[in-house]
């Protein structure tokens, strides 16, 4: 995989273990983003206050879920994704987050084989993707990544605590999107030559994005990625072929009533498509008012006069 690069933007990841955080001091240290632990078996007790504080300090914010060793099958993986989604909703919904939701999978105390580990991971990732409409990211260690197969289409956040050794290619990944290069005690250093982040008592994990702050914003906050993705509420990339959970019922009704063709529910709507929908609505409304389809043309002409201001 690639090495760290001068100019890459810096971030941290935190949980309740860091205790109270002065996020404005964190930002003043030169930290631009933060991944915040949301859930494991339940919501992290500082998740909501950390999201609020980091946002208020101007940091880009993401959330992660730690896959507990008790999660050993598909049903439990889906339940874990629901716990994560519920916490995201409690924080204000996916629109509050600036960075993709993360699956943190790094432990195998249940001695699962690689096939089951991959199935658990795949199920969790697909479920959180379905619930949020946002493509999630995988966090793991070099010692664990070989358990995965066929997941390299998801962005990778790799943990490798070293000032000199770069993460090696593994399980189909040849680049990292984020690199956790220090746990705050060992590994690489911040650009200022230390591992100290003001506003936090004690060590904290240090991370680097593969690009500048502007490139980070462009990747996850731009209007278009050039692929079948675009942003949700101006923040996160999403799959345009997946219906957002909050819009499912309205989408089904719009399709059933013939206003939309049923394809690419998350795609931006063009002016031409808007014109088709608006005109269909106008004609349906006129027919409803008239109660007689024979009168539609007469009412349509009258509506045109009204819209032009010729009353």
Image (spheres, grey):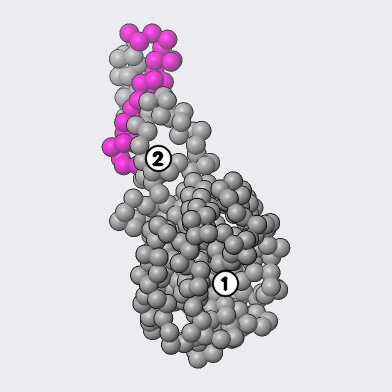
Q: Is residue 232 above or below residue 311?
A: below
Q: Is residue 269 above or below residue 49?
A: above
Q: Position of residue 184 (x, y in %)?
A: 58, 83
Q: Which mark is residue 282?
A: none
Name the foreground residue: 2 vs 5. Answer: 2
User: Which residue carries the number 1 mark?
Assistant: 13
The residue stretch that appears in magenta: 269-294
Task: Tell me if residue 52 can be seen.
Answer: no
Task: Tell me if residue 29 can be seen.
Answer: yes
Q: Position of residue 138 (x, y in %)?
A: 48, 63
Q: Residues within 10 Å of mark 2 (few under 14, many from 20)?
A: some
Q: Residue at x 58, y 50 (%)?
A: 73
Q: Who comes first in sequence, dot 2 or dot 1?
A: 1
In the image, which is nearer the foreground, mark 2 or mark 1?
1
Q: Secondary structure at mark 1?
A: strand
In the picture provided, is 66 more to the left or to the right than 207? Answer: right
Q: Residue at x 50, y 91 (%)?
A: 193
Query: Alpha carbon of mark 2 to alpha carbon of mark 1: how far?
Result: 33 Å
Res. 209 image quadrant: bottom left
Prevalent SS, magenta region: helix
User: Which residue carries the number 2 mark?
Assistant: 265
Q: Residue at x 55, y 74 (%)?
A: 12
Q: Residue at x 45, y 34 (%)?
A: 251
């Amino acid at each position: 995989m690639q090495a760290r690069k001068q100019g890459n933007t810096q971030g941290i990841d935190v949980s309740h273990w860091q205790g109270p955080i002065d996020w404005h001091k964190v930002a003043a240290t030169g930290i631009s983003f933060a991944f915040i632990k949301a859930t494991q078996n339940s919501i992290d007790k500082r998740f909501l206050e950390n999201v609020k504080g980091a946002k208020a300090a101007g940091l880009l914010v993401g959330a992660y879920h730690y896959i507990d060793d008790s999660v050993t099958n598909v049903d439990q993986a889906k339940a874990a994704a629901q716990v994560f989604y519920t916490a995201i909703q409690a924080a204000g919904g996916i629109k509050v987050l600036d960075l993709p939701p993360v699956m943190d999978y790094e432990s195998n105390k249940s001695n699962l084989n690689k096939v089951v580990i991959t199935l658990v991971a795949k199920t969790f990732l697909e479920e959180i993707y379905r619930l949020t409409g946002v493509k999630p990211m995988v966090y793991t260690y070099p010692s664990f990544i070989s358990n995965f197969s066929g997941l390299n289409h998801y962005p990778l956040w790799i943990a490798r605590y070293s000032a000199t050794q770069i993460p090696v290619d593994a399980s189909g990944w040849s680049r990292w999107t984020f690199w956790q290069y220090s746990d705050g005690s060992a590994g690489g250093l911040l650009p200022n030559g230390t591992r100290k982040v003001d506003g936090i008592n004690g060590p904290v994990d240090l991370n680097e994005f593969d690009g500048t702050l502007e490139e980070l914003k462009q990747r996850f906050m731009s209007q278009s990625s050039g692929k079948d993705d675009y942003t949700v509420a101006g923040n996160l990339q999403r799959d345009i072929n997946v219906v957002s959970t909050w819009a499912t019922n309205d989408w089904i009704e719009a399709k059933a009533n013939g206003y939309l063709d049923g394809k690419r529910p998350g795609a931006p709507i063009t002016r031409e498509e808007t014109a088709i929908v608006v005109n269909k609505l106008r004609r349906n409304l006129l027919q409803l008012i008239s109660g007689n389809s024979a009168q539609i043309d007469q009412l349509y002409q009258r509506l045109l006069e009204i819209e032009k201001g010729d009353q």
